[in-house]
Amino acid sequence: MKKYDYWDFRKDKVFKGFYVNRIMGLSRFKNDLYVLKTTTGKTLSIWGYRDIRNGLIKLKMPYPVRIEFKGIKKLEGNKRAFNFKINVGKGLQKLNKKGKTGKKRPTGARARH
């Protein structure tokens, strides 16, 4: 398997670019790894946290996305959840060199991909 740099979402809170691949069933927990490409052409990866998985799983690749890390929520039993906001849509297809985007479309049950 090819190795990718990991997107450090705690340092760079917003990713703008393209969702390009999903590598399924990695690690002993059978997690998915999502591969992203920046507007400058750098390839990064991120594990399939709940919000990432739910926001990207039905998209055709490559697909323009904007992902923002919203923080960590503490759960029962010393567990935690990483929260992300994912925007997809036609406005993001026109990403320019500065990474600015057009209109955003919400993700979730009502969003059509």
Image: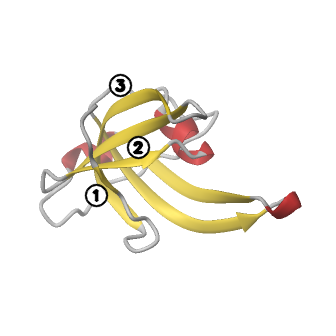
Q: Is residue 64 left or right of residue 49?
A: left
The residue to which callout 1 is attached is 101
Q: Comparing marks 3 and 1, which lies closer to the viewer? A: 3
Residue 86 image position (x, y, % from top left): 48, 50
Label at residue 37: none
Badge 1 amino acid: Thr
Number of disc labels: 3
Q: Earlier in the sequence, mark 3 or mark 2?
A: 3
Q: Pointer 2: residues within 10 angstroms few (<14), some, or many (20+)?
A: many
Residue displayed at 56% across by 66% down: 70
Examine the rendered structure and indicate whether residue 109 appears above or below residue 38.
above
Q: Is residue 60 left or right of residue 55?
A: left
Mark-to-mark CA distance, 3 and 2: 11 Å
Q: Is disc 2 placed on a helix, strand or loop?
A: strand
Q: Comparing marks 3 and 2, which lies closer to the viewer? A: 3
> Viewer-proximal residue, 78 or 107?
78
Q: Pointer 3: residues within 10 angstroms few (<14), some, or many (20+)?
A: few
Badge 3 amino acid: Lys
Examine the rendered structure and indicate whether residue 54 appears above or below residue 7.
above
Residue 30 image position (x, y, % from top left): 56, 30
Q: Is disc 3 placed on a helix, strand or loop?
A: loop
Residue displayed at 50% across by 29% down: 112
Badge 2 amino acid: Val
> Viewer-proximal residue, 35 or 2?
2
The N terminus, quarter of image: top left
Examine the rendered structure and indicate whether residue 65 appears above or below residue 74.
above
The residue to which callout 3 is attached is 60
Q: Is disc 1 placed on a helix, strand or loop?
A: loop
Label at residue 88: 2
Mark-to-mark CA distance, 3 and 1: 19 Å
Mark-to-mark CA distance, 2 and 1: 10 Å
